[in-house]
Amino acid sequence: MSLPEAIGLDLGGTKLLTGVVDTELNVHYESRERTTGASEQEVIDTIVEEIEEARRARPNVVAAGLGIPCTIDREKGVAINAVNLEITDVPIRDIVSERTGLPVLLDNDANVAALAEHRFGAAKGTTDAVMLTIGTGIGGGLIIDGELYRGSIGAGAELGHMVIDLHGSPCQGTCSNHGCIEACASGTALAREGTAKAGSHPESALGLALAREEAVTGKTVTEAAIAGDEAAREVMDLVGTRLGVGLSSLANIFNPDVMVIGGGVIVAGDLLLEPARRELRKRALPPMNETPVREAQMGNDAGMIGAAEMALEESEAVKR
C-alpha cells in the first residue's frame, strides 16, 4: 500500500519551490520556478500551474500546502500582506483550491520551515524552538509546547520585523519600519554593507568586483568571505553581530531549547553564526545566553517539506 502524499509549495521573494512528499519524508517530485517581479495574478497562476504539473507527475496527492512570505489569516485562508511580493488581501487558499480541485492548507513560509525543522531537522525532539530564515528578507517561526505558534488569526511570528536599531536602515518592501532585523541582517543587508565595504576597500575581492561593474550581492560577500577575503569577513562579522542582537532578545523572551538559522545566507556557516553566538552570550540574560544556535538541517527544501507536512498533518484524508 502506497503512503499518502501531499504537494508542498514554498514561495519566496525570488522563487517557488514545489515538491510532492509522503508521510515518510520521501520526495517524489520537485520543481523550481522564479517569481521575481511577478504580479499578484502571475503568482497565483504560477502556483496553480505548479500544482497541476505536480499532480500530473503524482496523481494520488491528497492535498496541497502553501508556504507564502506574508502575514496570514489562517481561518479565512487569506494572504494579507507580503513585504517582498505584490500580494495584498488575497483569498489565496480558496482561489487555488477552486482552480485545482484539491484541499489547500495555507501558512507563512517561515512557519512551515520551522515545522520541517521541528519534525525532522535541527529542532527535532525539542519542545520550544525559534527559527529565523535568512534570505532576501528574514522570516520567523516559533514552536511552543511542540506546536507552531501562529497568533490570534495566524499572522504571528513575523520575527524579521523585530526592531534592533531605532535609527537603523529603512526596512524593505511594504514594511514602513526602520532598524528591523530584516533590514540589518538579511541577505539584502549583506549586499548593502558589502557594497559600502567595496567602496572603502578597492583592493579587496569586493572592491575588485565593484571595479568590474559587478553588483555586490549577498552571494558575492558570502563567497568572498568563504574564500578568505578579509573585507568580506568583516562584513559577515558585522551582519552576524546584528543577528546576535536579535537572537538575544528572542532568547530572553521565549527561553527556547534551541534557535535554528536557515535560509540561503546560512551557506556562510560559522562565519555568520559565530559572531551571532558571541553577541548572544554577551547580551542575553543567564541562562538564556547559553541557548544553542544551530544551522538548519533541511536546507533549501525546508519550506517545501514543511508545507507538505502541514498538508499531511491537517488533511482529513490522512490517518497517521
Image (cartoon, rainbow, N blue to C red):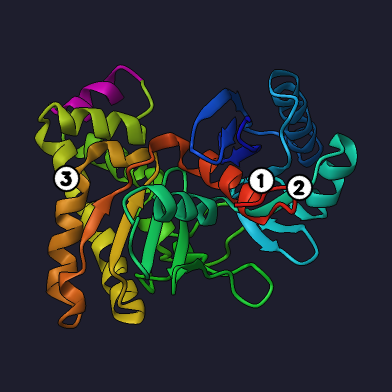
Label 2: state its secondary structure: strand
- Is 222 displayed left or right of 214 in the figure? left
Disc number placed over residue 270 in the picture, else none = 3
Label pair 1/2, CB-CB below 8 angstroms: yes
Q: Which residue position is annotated with label 1?
A: 66
Q: Residues within 10 Å of mark 1 (few under 14, many from 20)?
A: many
Count of picture labels: 3
Query: Disc 1 to disc 3, how far (Cα)?
Result: 31 Å
Q: Which residue position is annotated with label 2?
A: 104
The residue that appears at 17% across and 34% down in the rendered structure is: 225
Q: Mark 2 or mark 1, which is nearer the start of the sequence?
A: 1
1 or 2: mark nearer the eye: 2
Q: What residue type is labelled 2?
A: Val
Label 1: state its secondary structure: strand
Dominant secondary structure of the magenta stretch?
helix
Label 3: state its secondary structure: helix
1 or 3: mark nearer the eye: 1
Query: Disc 1 to disc 2, how far (Cα)?
Result: 7 Å
Near-viewer residue (23 or 247): 23
Near-viewer residue (290 or 170): 290
Q: Which amino acid does label 3 sit on?
A: Asp
Residue 314 image point, x, y percent: 67, 56
Q: What stretch is highlighted in magenta?
A: 204-213
Q: How crowded is mark 3: few (under 14 residues within 10 Å), some or many (20 or more)?
A: some
The residue that appears at 35% across and 48% down in the rendered structure is: 121
Q: Mark 3 or mark 1, which is nearer the start of the sequence?
A: 1
Residue 183 image point, x, y percent: 42, 56
